[in-house]
Amino acid sequence: MKKNILYKSLLVLSISMVSLSCEKFLDDKPKTSLTTGNSYSTANDIESVLTGCYNIFYGTDYYQWEYIMMSEVRSDNAYPGGNNEETFFDYDRFNLPASNSHNYVNWGNLYKGIARANILLNKIAEVTDPALTADRRKQIIGEASFLRAYHYFQLVKLYGGVPLELQSNTANPTSTRKARATEKEVYDQINADLLVAVANLPDAYSTGSVSKVRATKGAANALLAKAWAQRTDRDYTEVLKYTNAVITGAGGYSLLASYDHLFDGAHDYNAESILEVPYEEGNWSASSWGIQLYLAPEDGWQKYCVPSKNLVAAFDAQGDNVRKNANIIFMKKDANGDPIAWPDENWNPCQDPTVGIPFNYKAKHAGGWASGDNYYFLRLGDIVLLKAEAQNETGATAAAITTLNTIRTRAGLAALSTSMSKAEAKTAILNERRLELAFEAQRWDDLVRAGVATTTMLALNEVTYTCVGGNAGPAVKMDYSKCNQNRWIYPIPQLEIDANPNLKQNPGY
C-alpha cells in the first residue's frame, strides 16, 4: 500500500502543474487553488476555473475508487478484500465509526467540488470580457450547476440531509457553521441546479468526445431522473419524464449492440455514454490509479472489492455469461505466471493453485497505477432500466417488461413475460439492474430505493474460511446484523461535528 500512497500523492501534486488535452475536459490549465479573492476578469480565467471544477474527478479518493467501494462492498455484490482493511471491513459490516478518516476525506472531497462550482457561479457575473460570449456564459453556468448538483447527489445519498453551501471561501461563521438541511431541501436544490443546467446546456458540443466528458442537457436530464427516483419523497412520474427526455432527446444516445464493447477500453465516447471520466494511460495527472486497487495482482498484495459468491450465483442463475465475463475475471496466477500470493478468505483460503480468485473486471487495464480506461458516471443502460422501474411503479407493468427486455436481449438472454405482476416485475427489474450495472456504484442505491437493503443483507449467506493444516477450516458466517435502516446512511464525520456545533449526528451513531 505504500506504493499506492506515493502514487496518489504525486497525482494530486501533478494536477496543479499539468494541463490536459482537448479530450480531458478542457484545454486550459486549471486553477485548482480557487478563492473568492482571486481575480477573474477574462474569458480564459473563467474557462480555467471550469477546468478546476472538472478536475475534482481526477485527484480525489472518492471519485477514483471509494464511491464504488461504498456502494458495492456494503451491498451483496462484493467483499472488502484488501486483507480486510479496517475501513472497508467496517463499510461491509455496517459498523463505520464517525471518527473514520476515509469518511472524513470523502466528505471533504465532495465539498471541495461544491466549493469550486460555487466560486465559478458566484464570479462569472463579474466578467465583462467580450470574448466570453452570451452562449458560452450560459453553457458554463449550466456546467457548474450540473457539477454542484452531482456532488450534492453523492452527499445526500451518503449522509442524508447535509449543510447546503451555495457560497464558498468565507470566514463568516453563519456560512461556515451551517446546520444540516433536510434531505428534501438538498434534493430540491439538486433539482433547481439541474433545471438551470437543462435550460443552459447544449445537447452536444461540436466535438463528439467532448459531448461525453462535459455536462450536456442529456446528462442533466439523466441526473434529474436518478435524483427523483432516489429521494425519499420520490416521484416516478418525474422519473419517467426525465428518462424519456434522455432516451428520445436530441443527444442521440443508443444502446451498443455488444455489452462487451462498453468496457473493453476500445470504445470510449460511444453512443451509450452520457457522461464518462476520460483517463489517459501513463499520465499521472489524468489517469486512474483506482483500477489497480481492484485488478492486476502483479504487485503481490490482495485487491479490493472482491466479487461475492452471491453475485456470481446471480449471473449463473440467469445463464448470463456475457455480463458475468465482462464484470468478473477469475485468476489462478499473477502476471508472472506464479500462483496468487495471498490466501483469500472467501474463495481460496489455502492458496490452492487450482482454484481461481475473482476480481472486479469492469475496467480491464490497470496500467500500473496509471490506467487509461474511462469510467461511466451516466450511461443509457442505467436510464433504460430506470425507465422500466418508473413504468412499473406508475402501473404500466407490461410496458416496463418490454423496456427491460431491450437490456436482456443485448445480453443474449430470453425475454421475460409481460404478464407478470407488479411485484414480480419490481424484483425482476432490481435483479436486472444488478447484473447490468455491477461495479458501477449503483447496487446499494438500488437496494435502498427498493426498500430491501436490510432484508437483503440479513438474508445473505456468505462465509469466510481460514486455512487449517492445508485445508479450509470451518465456515464462519459473515455478520450483517447491524444493517438496520439507520445504517443505510453514514455518520457525519466527527471532525466536522467538532468544528461546527450546529451539525447534529445521524441517528444510530
Image (tube, rainbow, N blue to C red):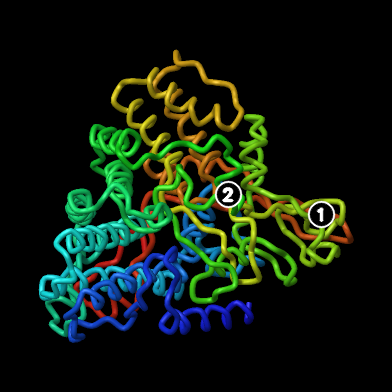
Q: Give the vertical position of 498 relative to 255 (above or below).
A: below
Q: In this image, 146 relative to 334: left or right?
A: left
Tag 2 secondary structure: loop
Label number found at residue 166 = none
Q: What residue is shown with label 1?
A: 472
Q: In this image, 322 relative to 146: left or right?
A: right
Residue shown at 57% from the left, 79% from the top: 7
In the foreground, 234 or 247: 247
Residue type highlighted by circle 2: Phe
In the foreground, 199 or 148: 199
> What x and y, as percent, mark residue 495?
34, 78
Is the residue marked by circle 2 packed among few (<14), some (14-19), or many (20+) residues within 10 Å?
many
What quarter of the picture does the N terminus occupy?
bottom right
Q: Give the vertical position of 107 relative to 407 (above or below).
A: below
> What x and y, as percent, mark residue 410?
55, 31
Q: CA distance from mark 1 to mark 2?
A: 35 Å
Residue type highlighted by circle 1: Ala
Q: What residue is shown with label 2?
A: 263
What quarter of the picture does the C terminus occupy?
bottom left
